[in-house]
Image (cartoon, grey):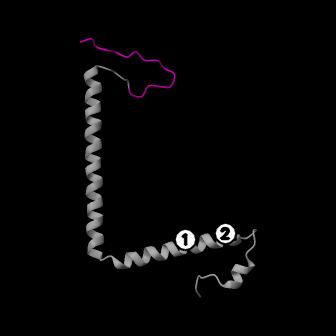
Amino acid sequence: MTDETTPQDEENMTEENGGPFDAFMDHQRRAFEEMGKALDSLIPESFKGHAQSAFKESIEGYRKLFNSALDEINAAVERTGLSFRKGQEAGEEEAVEVKDE
């Protein structure tokens, strides 16, 4: 048995059980899925492996860049002499130390 909708099924659709727009969207979703499968079958497995490795390297590069930026921000905060206490409870005021240079 296939998962395709027959013309009889489409005729029986009413606003309560989906309607023509929902049937249209269902067909478009299936078409999109099938197009993805068709394109996937055209791409060689070795290309997919290299593309995945390239993606992972790209993510690692961004991770290093962001970590470096965070380190620079932390160093700048430390150079300004601001002191923030970790675990401060809500509503509790804290004095902020500022060193004059």
Q: Residues within 10 Å of mark 2 (few under 14, many from 20)?
A: few
Residue 30 against residue 82 in the figure, above or below: below
Residue 23: x and y in percent read: 65, 73
Does the magenta run of residues contain 97? yes
Specify the amino acid type for callout 2. Answer: Phe
Q: Label 2, secondary structure: give it.
A: helix
**Magenta segment boundaries in residue numbering:** 86-101
Which residue is drawn at the image coordinates 29% and 58% (left, top)?
Answer: 56
Looking at the image, the residue that sits furthest to the top is: 100
* Pointer 2 residue: 21
Q: How far apart, in angstroms, are the residues tagged by discs 2 and 1?
A: 12 Å
Residue 75: x and y in percent read: 25, 29
Residue 52 against residue 67 in the figure, above or below: below
Q: Quadrant of the C terminus?
A: top left
Front-lying residue, 95 or 72: 72
Front-lying residue, 91 or 51: 51
Which residue is drawn at the image coordinates 73% and 80% (left, top)?
Answer: 11
Q: Residues within 10 Å of mark 1 (few under 14, many from 20)?
A: few
Front-lying residue, 24 or 101: 24
Residue 29 has which mark? 1
Which residue is drawn at the image coordinates 28% and 19% (left, top)?
Answer: 81
Which residue is drawn at the image coordinates 43% and 76% (left, top)?
Answer: 37
Total residue callouts: 2
